[in-house]
Every structure is written in structure tokens, then in C-alpha cells.
Image (tube, coloured by chain):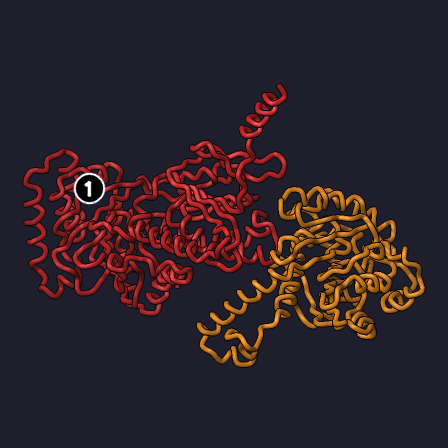
Amino acid sequence: MSMIFRRALASVSTKSVEPKVVDVLIVGGGPAGLTLSAALKNSRITRDLNIQLVEGFKLDGVKSFYEETPELLTNRVSSLTPQSVEFLQRIGAWKFIRQERVQPYDGMVVTEGLSDARLSFDHPEIATMCENVNLQSSLYQRIKELESQTAEGEAFGLDIKDDTKVTSITKDESNDWPIVHLSNGESIKTRLLVGADGFNSPVRKFSGIESRGWFYNRFGTVATVKLEYAPFVSCAWQRFLPTGPIALLPMPDDNATMVWSTTPELSELLTKVEPELFVSLANAAFLLNNVDMEYYYQCLRKDETEGLVDDIQWRIDHMTQKFTEEELDEKFPVKIISVQDKSRARFPLRLSHADTYVADRIALVGDAAHTTHPLAGQGLNMGQGDVQALVNALEQGITRGLDIGNLLVLEPFWADRYPENNLLLGVVDKLHKLYACTSEPIVALRSFGLNAVNQLTLLKDFMIGHVSGK
Amino acid sequence: MIITRPIRVGCSGIARLVSAKRLHSHLTSSSSDELSHFNELAKTWWDVSGPQRILHKMNLLRMDFIQEMLRSYVPIPPETDIYVPGYSLDLLPSEISQQIVHEQETYRDEQLKQANLRALDIGCGGGILTESLARLNYIKSVVGVDLSPGVLEAASFHKLLDPITERKITYELKPVDQVQEKYDVVTMMEMLEHVDYPAEVLIQALDKVEVGGWLFLSTINRDLISYFTTILVAEHLIGIVPKGTHSFDKYINSKELVDWIGKRPGFEVVSVRGCMYVPFKGWVFCGDGTTGNYLAAVRRLS
């Protein structure tokens, strides 16, 4: 009798099992979450922390990328500033980057659709184009390397759970530590909860931190494309059209990646049109004037696309015959000849900025804290900067014997990052608005401005310094 | 009149240090009005944005000081390849010197981890420093003693919120002269200026230090600058410190302290450093500690 009773008791006690307790729980296995994991395990001060990373999607592609590198480029590509690259080198991840798939560029040409104004930069290494999965993979490999260096008998203290979603977050009643409940039925209690969980951050919502901002009523259409030939100098091209900027960014050899920001309606059409027509339209967007583009948009809307490819080609030929071969090379990007199958995708563009990045036992990094228009290529780099500042703050907190979930530890991180991010978000926002304008005096003024800036080497050096994060 | 607390007339400073010798040990306790004052503060002690924010901020600097002292006294053995005579490190290219510093610090981490130090926090209050000490991975255990039941209660409650502090800290309601054992690290922060007979407390504190161990203390110089910053501005004008926290005649000059400890065989004052509060920035080190607030590190040699 007593045996049965004891057994019943035992089964009850296993059901109400205490949640696993960790020091840092990172929600999100994107670039920000993985960088934070690798950086914390790399630091001599924070390496003893017990860390749990949770990612909602499968990370199979990330895990296998280094050994079984796919042939085709992926369409999620980011521009890494030299500062971000330096940080990745410092935490030992950069050596695991598949170097044959990244492309540094040292030139940038900015033009606009309503006038001939142009601004061009030459600077040794403005930024490096890198697929997000390549970056994630390098971080994953670094984490594996650090794990293999753990002394025998010592726990590594970093566990990555993918394909596991956060179902809810609650608070421990006794000490206010967050408890994260997962889709696999597990619960994890944590000293510090880091939201690296993107724009719709569940962690931010749990923390009650407000995020403010707006949709631009624009979508970015990304695509991986092939060029007629590999360019002689690697250069980023960006042209501001009234509907939004189109950017062509170099990838190795004759590959390139493009982001075309435009209205929701057009972006949908652009992702659906025949590949051949998409290529023609993309070329046209860099060469033809806005009136022509408006006409093509109309054709797309009415689904009158027959003969459009030829029409575009005729206009491009007509436009380019004014220039010599040399001028063409200098003024316009190399012609796009094809778009990679299934590489077109679109995403909404928005500006958002959380009121703060920290609350008691909470820190937000990357898109969970801020999202920006991709026109300056700063989104991912802002996240890298956040991670760097958070690691610094945690190192200092541990050195001072503080509880790393305490606001005293976390406040310097947000004080360090908020002003810088706010400035960048603001500048990018103003640029977007300035170029969305078609009013003639404003076009004249901004063209004058762009041309004037183009003449001022000092100012250009200063600007490029900001873009490249130096 | 801004000063709401009467300034006590009588012996102060060095005179208090000297005269204490002939007093009985129970006088190491704080005066009763001090105790009730701290009892009042217990409730909000751990609110880092509350009335004790400035103390929480000061704790950051104390920990920097303690860490610096403890770490710098872990010798790098000359026979190892990470040993570099101090003067030549700056001459190396920065990448190499950074690498050497990194390796030296890693070596110190390992050495300290093996040391398993035991610490005693005298006048631990709500446990701000006690908890910080406990979280250092090379400190095995910390005992916090105080005479105010209210704040000790706040401290005992708060330590339970974190498994590390729960495991490592013991709080005891008793005067320092009733502490029996010796410790590797003894701390006595912002305490001498609150007791009536500091010399007696100091004798007791030094007595609790293990040979080779440290006493860290902080207090306030008895000068016009201290009066201006700690009482007039901090308590009365901007109110970042609760009123009645300080009494001017209890402040002790660092020179008095250094001379007094210097006369005691077996102890060496390793460092005295001034510190000040800069609004919007927090506490920073400044000067040689002869004005305003200061921290001191004392080592027991024998």
C-alpha cells in the first residue's frame, strides 16, 4: 500500500518538475542571436555563463553550409561594414566565412531618377557583401570550435535548440526571473532574457517595451542576378526613383544581388513577372528616366506585357548610344542578363525603434529593437553593434560582481547604442522621404546638393566613414 | 539654516581614533540614531532607481578598486612565457601587447579561481557589496555582518533571489568584535564615518584579516569639499542621498588613517584613491584621496 502511495507521489513530483535554469536565454538564431552566443563564449569574462539559444525555425541550412556549401547564392544578403567584419574577426568567426562567396566593394555610385545628379565614392573597402547564411554558418562553426576546446570534464554551457518556438513567457513569482515556455513542452528560467527575435519580437512584447515607427508603404524586392560579365571594379550602385531606391550590389564574379524598394503593388508584380521581363525592368530602372518607368509600371498593372522586353531594349539602346563605351562603364552598372530561379522575394519596409532596449532582466538586440529602410545597408550592422555593446556591458557587470539581469548592468548597453541607432534611423528616414519627392524645386535642390557633395572630398570621406562604421 | 542635524561637539577625526583605544569593545557598535536611520532605508535598499541609487553606483567603483588590487597582486611568474617586465609592455606593437595582456589576465583568472577566497563584509547593510563579492567566481563564501536588524532582513531576503548569493552568503547580526574567524578579503565600506569609535572598529577589522589577505575600506575626508559634496549638495540641495546619512564630525582624513595603520606592525597601506560622483556619469576615481571620498586597500603582511 505504502509502496503504491510512494510511487504516486514520485510521479506527481516529476510532473511539476522545476524549469531548467540558465544565465542567458537568447531568443532568435539569426545573425544577432548567433553573434551574441559566439561572442559571449569567446570572452574570457563571460565564457562561464550558462547560455540557451532558442530558434523557431530549423537551422539545418546553417549547420551544413560550411561543409556542404550550396552551389547557388542565397537571396538574403547583407552589407557588412569594416567595423562588423573586425568584430567578427575578433570573436574568431570570420575565418569560417566561405570567402569565395563574399565580395568586398570599394566604390559606390548614387544617382537619381529625376535628374542626372550623381554622387560617387571611392574608398578602400566600404563594405563587404555577404549572404546571411554564410555569416550564421561562420558563427555556428566558431561555436563548435569553442565547444571542442572546452576542458575535459567541464560543461560548455551553450545549448542551441532550433525548430522550437516560444509559446509564452511568464515570470517566476519568487524572484521575478522570466520563464520561457517552449513548443516542445519545456520551460526555461533565465537570469537574463535577450530578444534577438526580430521585428515581431515576443520578448519585447513580454517586456512591455513600446516600439514606435511606421510602415513606409514600400516593399523591398530582393533577387540574385547574373551580370553580362564580372565588373572590373566592385562597386555598389544605387538609384533613387520616386517609388524608392533600386540597388545593385556586387557578389563574386558575374553575380550580384539587388534590392528594389517600391510600392506594395509594384513589388508584387515584380516578383511575379516573367524572369526575362524582370531583368529588362531592372536594367531599365538604372538607365531610363522616370517617365519611361511610369509607362512600364502602367503596362504591368494592366498586364499588357507583350513586346515590353523589346520596347525596353529599344529605349535602352536609344539612350545608351549617346555615350561612348567608356562613359557607359563609368556611369552605369554592368547589364543584368538573368535572374536566379526562385530568388525573388519581397518584404515590407518599415522604421521602428523601441523606446528602450532594456528592462529588468531583458535586453533587446537587432531588429527586435529597431528596423530600418535598407537603403543604407545598415540593418544588420546596427545589430552587430548592439551585440558588441551588450557583451561589453555584461563583461563589465560580471567583473563588478553584479547580477547580469540587473538594470545597472544593462543600462550602459542601451545608453551606448540608442543615440547612434536613432541617428542612423533618422538619417535613413529623411533620405527616403527626400527622394520620394517629385516636386520640381525639391528635385532641383537635392540634385544640386548631391552634385555639390560630390565635389567635396572631405565631406564625402566623413560620410563614407559613417556608412562603413569607422 | 540648511543643516538639520546638529554637528556633534567633541573629539573628532584623529582624536576619535586615539581616544577609542581605551574604550570597551561594545562601543564598536553604531549609535542608536544611526541604526534607526538605516532601518528606515531597508525597504528601498535594492531598488536601483530608488533612494540608494547613488550607493549602487558607488558599488561599481568599489568593485573596480577591489578587482584591480586583487588581480594586480597575482604574480606572473618570471619563468613563464607570458612574463613581461612592466616597463617594456608599452613598447611592443599594440596587437602583441593586447595578446600578452589577454594571456596574463587569463592566467590570473585561473590562479584566482584556485584561490577560493573567503570574504567578510563589515557593515554590510542591505548587502550591495556582499552580493557583488559573492558573485566573483574566485570568492568561495562571504559573511556579512551588520547591527541594523532591518537592513539585514532586507539583505537576507534579497540574497534568496539569486541561487549564487543564496549559496555563498551568510548574514549575521553582530558587532565585528564578535566575529571569530579570519578572512582573505575583509571589506568595510562607508562605515567608519557612521561609528562613534572608529579606531576600535579598525583594530577589530584588521584583526579579522588573514596573513596575505586584504582589508578594503572607504570613508570620507573631514574637509570643506566633503561637507559641500556629501552633506550640503547630496543630502540637502539635490537630495540624491537620504537626509541624515552623514555627520561631518565623524569623517576621517586619509592621512590620519594611513599614519594610524602605518604604526601597526604587519600591515601595509597599498593604495589610497580618491573618488567623486559626477552627475550623469556616476562615480569616478580622482586624485590621491586627500579630499572628499576615498577608498583604501590595506594588506596584511604578517
User: Which residue reaches farthest top?
Assistant: A1
Chain at tag 1 = A
Q: Is residue A305 left or right of residue B30?
A: left
| SS at mark 1 in the image | loop
Considering only vertical position in the picture, is B173 above or below B296? above
What letter labels the chain drawn in orange?
B
Front residue of this view, candidates A53 and A171: A53
B184 displayed left or right of A59: right
Identify residue type, mark 1: Lys
Q: Position of residue B10 (x, y in %)?
A: 92, 63
Mark 1 — residue? A342
Q: Nearer the viewer, residue A439 or A327?
A: A327
Q: Position of residue B200 (x, y in %)?
A: 86, 62
Horizontal side, residue A327 vs residue B297: left or right: left
Residue A132 rendering spot, x and y as whole percentages: 31, 50
Identify the chain drawn in red: A
User: Would you place residue B69 above or below residue A275 in this image?
Assistant: below
* Residue A422 in view: no
